[in-house]
Amino acid sequence: MKNSLHIVFALMLTVPMSAFSQEGEEIRKDDSIDKISLPRTKEDGLQVKVYTIDSISGDVKDTTTIKFKHSTVYIVSENDKDSLDPTEVSRERKKDLTYWAGIDLGINGFLSPSGDIDLGKENDYMELDYPQSRSLSINVFEQKLRLFKDYVGVTTGAGIQWNSYRLANDYTLSTTKDTLFAVMDSSINLKKNKFRTTWINVPLLLEFNTSQTQKNNVHLSAGVVGGLHLGTMYKQKYTSEGAKSRYKTKNDFNVAPYKLEAMVRLGYGSFNVYATYQLTELFEKGKGQELYPFTLGVTLVAF
């Protein structure tokens, strides 16, 4: 918030008010509160007011005293919220009470078509090491349409997301044009075995706030997020006959080109947690196992 600089003259105030006026400047005098205001300029954004000593009010934060022979000058800094541009205040409040833009970090998982986290023996090559299966999102843009002040609104935006899936079992993934499959090679000892998908995301969320100040606000948003698949990377680190090796390839691995997921975001003040569940299959239909990704996470940094 910008502070106004209040110059207070007290005790033996001998300088006439006309001394503050310079040729060509506009000076306004308000006799009701005994002050002089110099116009605010766009360049410095500063408002200067001259008060008598008994007209000081407000939340005084700091005072500097300058003594002259026949007078004393007090330089007082205080919060002056009323001097802010109402449009600027509204814009800042709208930004503070929208909760998409920022950096999100989460844990990834898979659910079966029946909603079970146990994928079954036929899909055990897709079982995950959950602590090492992470999601990172950088949501760089947000925009909100107010429906009722800042209490209810529709939020959209854009972001980029990397979903990493660390495979728990020692299978090697491979793919043909129509099929994703896995093989186990007993001649290698896998140290890292993961694949990572990259997406461009666009949300459409209905957002609710309980307050018009971020500090005391409980906020909830729910809706859908659409995603465009940018690519998939598969990486392995392993030892074979005592020698360390790495393998990395980029392929689409039959991951579906688009996704649609449900999202819920909940928080208090600047703290925010979220959950997503993908409504569409991870892989193209008939070209991979029927799996539905989910993510549980927290916002690390809000923009």
Image (cartoon, rainbow, N blue to C red):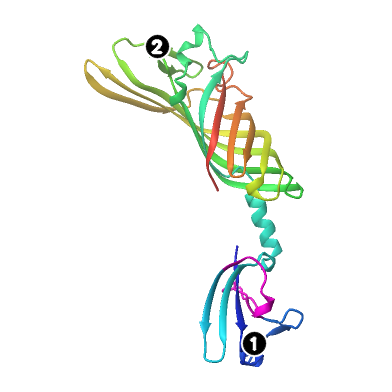
The mark total stands at 2
Residue 51: which quarter of the image? bottom right
126 vs 160: above or below: above
User: What residue is drawn where x is 66% and y is 90%?
Assistant: 17
N-term mark: 2 or 1: 1
User: What residue is drawn where x is 57% and y is 34%?
Assistant: 228
Left or right: 267 in relation to 29: left
Residue named by callout 1: 25
As drawn, the label of residue 183 is 2
x%, y% of residue 97?
Answer: 65, 48
| Nearer to the camera, 252 or 3 | 3
Residue 1: which quarter of the image? bottom right
Q: Secondary structure at mark 1?
A: loop
Pointer 1 local density, CA inside 10 Å: few below 14, some 14–19, many at least 20: few
Residue at the limit of the structure toward the top, as seen here: 121
Q: Which residues are magenta?
A: 38-61
As drawn, the label of residue 211 is none
Q: Amino acid at mark 1?
A: Glu
Left or right: 68 in relation to 239: right
x%, y% of residue 43?
Answer: 57, 74
Pointer 2 local density, CA inside 10 Å: few below 14, some 14–19, many at least 20: few
165 vs 150: above or below: above
| Nearer to the camera, 300 or 200 | 300
User: What residue is drawn where x is 70% and y is 50%?
Assistant: 212
x%, y% of residue 262?
Answer: 65, 29
